[in-house]
Amino acid sequence: MRLLTAAFVTAVLAATLPAAAQEEPIQTTIRNQLTALGQDDFATAFSFASPTIKSLFGTADNFGMMVRQGYPMVHRSGEVRMLELREVAGNLWQRVMITDQQGRTHLLDYQMVETAEGWQINGVQLLPQLGVGA
């Protein structure tokens, strides 16, 4: 029984280690992009985007316009808190809680991909606010 328990614990740890081992570099990438966005340094912010995102928007200016219009809480973030990093269907997702300049809290999921340049952001989903509905 003890051997079975040890095998189970080892299997669980092995399954979570890949995501956990990447937590710091992933969070650093997101924080660096948020810092650049807060300084209107869209060229640097764009450098943290994956090749897919770069091909979608083409230029740092287009990317900056999308962020300003669609993600104002990211463009001018206040407090940033990293929550859980998890693997879903082979993809790593970092949940981030951002309090904007007006004091409103937003939850976002950042899909991360590892490239030759390191971890890059492959998409951001704004999650629905709890308790808000029709």
Image: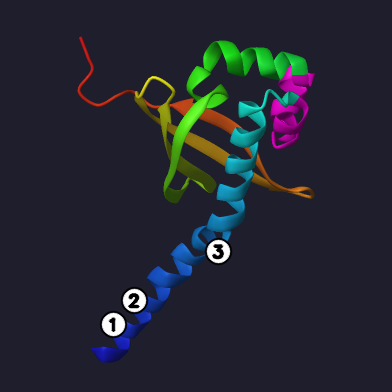
Q: Nearer the viewer, residue 18 or 102?
A: 102
- Asked if residue 59 is positioned above or below residue 30 in the image, the reply reads above
Q: Which mark is residue 5?
A: 1
Q: Mark 2, mark 3: which one is toward the viewer?
A: 3
Pointer 3 residue? 21
Residue in the image at 55% along x and 38% along y: 111
Where is residue 32? Give x, y as percent. Answer: 64, 41
Q: Secondary structure at mark 3?
A: helix
Looking at the image, tell me whether mark 1 or mark 3 is earlier in sequence order. 1
Magenta stretch: residue 130 in it? no
Q: Secondary structure at mark 1?
A: helix
Relative side of 70 to 49, left or right: left
Q: Quadrant of residue 102?
A: top left
Residue in the image at 38% along x and 69% along y: 12
Look at label 2 and name its amino acid. Phe
Pointer 2 residue? 8
Where is residue 9? Give x, y as percent. Answer: 35, 76
Look at label 3 and name its amino acid. Ala
Q: Secondary structure at mark 2?
A: helix
- Numbered range of the magenta stretch: 43-60
Q: Residues within 10 Å of mark 2 (few under 14, many from 20)?
A: few
Residue in the image at 42% along x and 71% along y: 13
Q: Which mark is residue 37?
A: none
Q: Mark 1, mark 3: which one is toward the viewer?
A: 3
- State the predominant SS element of the stretch in magenta: helix
Where is residue 24? Give x, y as percent. Answer: 56, 57
Tags 1 and 3 touching, CB below 8 Å: no
